[in-house]
Amino acid sequence: MEPIRTFVGIVAPLERANVDTDQIIPKQFLRSIERTGFGDALFFDWRYLPDGSPNLEFELNAPHRTGATILVADTNFGCGSSREHAVWAVQQYGFKAVIAPSKRNGETCTPGFADIFRNNTVNNGLLLIELAEEEVKWIFAVAKGRRLEATVNLDAQTVSIHGDVEKTFHFDITPDVKERLLKGLDAIDLTLAYEADISAYEAAHDLFLP
């Protein structure tokens, strides 16, 4: 995995809640388990018309969104099935981070991201940033109809919006996930970090005994 620290990118707003994994990467593209070639299929049913031409009314197809690396969505992004292809598609399109709000209504909280999708992103090096509802609404408002850039700083845990009005938002992230993303460590890398201890244990025990 590529380490993530600080990067500047174009913001692509997708003001839709409950974007499920079948919308992120439709089922007909799941025939391959190779981790390549999924970027063109991201949001396929929204990006393209039935004749295969680009849907110019879809947000991400606007010319000023070209090359976007920061996706901003509404709550519960990545719900639905557990397909890891959804994360691959988001990354291979070019996104390095996804921002979504958590919404509170009394004692009820709607998360920014579905749990299984969140776990899959950690294993693939995609940064998820959960902000407050009013903060994401502000980003949607300032990004409407214009090219907007932002700086993501994982070390400082901040997102800084650049424009007529500059704003910086702080986000929380669990320390272990932050460490993995900063160092670009997947689950295998974490295991290999204890290779010496594993080898010592195996050398001291009979491998044929339980």
Image (cartoon, rainbow, N blue to C red):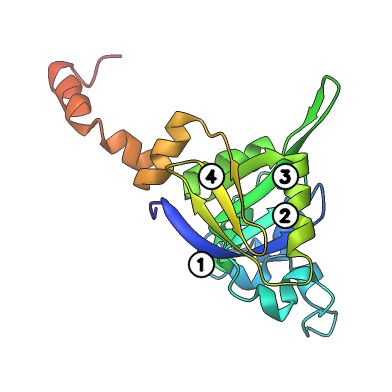
Check disc 3 and give the amino acid type: Glu
Spatial separation of the CA atoms under disc 3 and disc 4: 12 Å
Whole-percent x and y of residue 34?
50, 62
- 100 and 93: which is toward the camera: 100
How far apart are the two marked residues, 3 and 2, measured between alpha carbons? 6 Å
Residue that mark 3 sits on? 135
Dot 1: element:
loop
Residue plotted at (19% across, 23% down): 202
Q: Give the amino acid type for the residue marked by disc 2 in the picture.
A: Ile
First reached walking from the N terminus: tag 2 or tag 4: 2
At 57% across and 61% down in the image, what residue appears?
95
How far apart marks 1 and 4 lie (CA) works out to: 30 Å
Q: Is residue 165 left or right of residue 176?
A: right
Disc 2 marks which residue?
139
Element at label 3 = helix
Residue 187 placement (x, y as % from top left) = 40, 39
Q: Which residue in the structure is indicated by mark 1? A: 36
Q: Give the number of callouts.
A: 4
* 48 to 172, vertically: above or below: below
Residue 115 screen position, x and y as percent = 66, 35
* Badge 4 element: strand
Tag 3–tag 2 contact (CB < 8 Å): yes
Whole-angstrom CA distance, mark 3 to mark 1, is 34 Å
